[in-house]
Image (cartoon, rainbow, N blue to C red):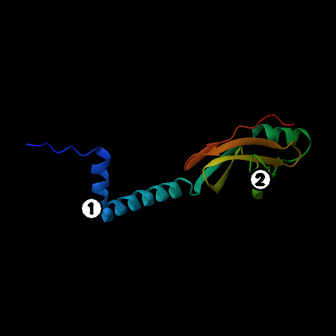
Amino acid sequence: MSEEPTPSAWSRFTTYLSKNRSRVARFALLVALLYAVTDLVSSSPRDATLSLPLDEVRAEARAAGQSGDEVEITILVPDTGEPLTHTRQRLEDDARELRHDVHLAPGAYDVRLDVTGAEPRRSHFEIPAEGVVRVRWSSPP
């Protein structure tokens, strides 16, 4: 009685692949499709609201004899400083914070706030998901 040698794992694997090509191809296509959809969803733009504090900026503008009622908000790319969005608006007299809606892809951004009569403020923020992103100003230059 002669014993047949046991096929190696690689031999069994290649035999399986040759017999089940269409199954393996469908499985590989499904994995690639799931990866592509996951990547697409994770990088799609999200709605968020920036919460921009105004107390110090408006106090500085009023100390300079300005009303501090007009503001400009600019969203910038951090590395290049290239503006992505720019908004100009008037503030109500008693506004202590400004809410600004954005629709941006997840990642890091800079925001610049220019208030009439005050030094411009700049800050860095990240869009992780939907919701409110609270901004803290760095000292004026």
- Tell which of 29 and 24 is nearer to you: 24
Q: Is residue 84 left or right of residue 127?
A: right
| Amino acid found under the numbered disc labelled 2 | Thr
Q: Position of residue 32 (x, y in %)?
A: 44, 58
| Amino acid found under the numbered disc labelled 1 | Lys
Which residue is outermost to the front? 1
Q: Residues within 10 Å of mark 1 (few under 14, many from 20)?
A: few
User: For mark 1, what is the residue?
Assistant: 19
Quarter of the image for the C terminus: give it: top right
Task: Give the CA separation, mark 2 to mark 1.
Answer: 60 Å
Q: Is residue 97 left or right of residue 140?
A: left
Using the image, tell me which numbered label, if any, was put on residue 85: none
Residue lying at 68% horizontally and 41% vertically, measured from the top left:
135
Q: Residues within 10 Å of mark 2 (few under 14, many from 20)?
A: some
Q: Position of residue 31 (x, y in %)?
A: 40, 56
Q: Position of residue 51 (x, y in %)?
A: 66, 45
Q: Is residue 5 left or right of residue 63?
A: left
How many numbered discs, if any?
2
In which quadrant of the rendered view does residue 139 lie? top right
User: For mark 2, what is the residue?
Assistant: 74
Q: Are the residues tagged 2 and 1 within 8 Å (C-beta)?
A: no
- Does 93 sit above or below residue 59? below
- Tell which of 135 and 117 is nearer to you: 135
Which residue is outermost to the top? 139
Q: Position of residue 101 (x, y in %)?
A: 64, 55
Q: Secondary structure at mark 2?
A: strand
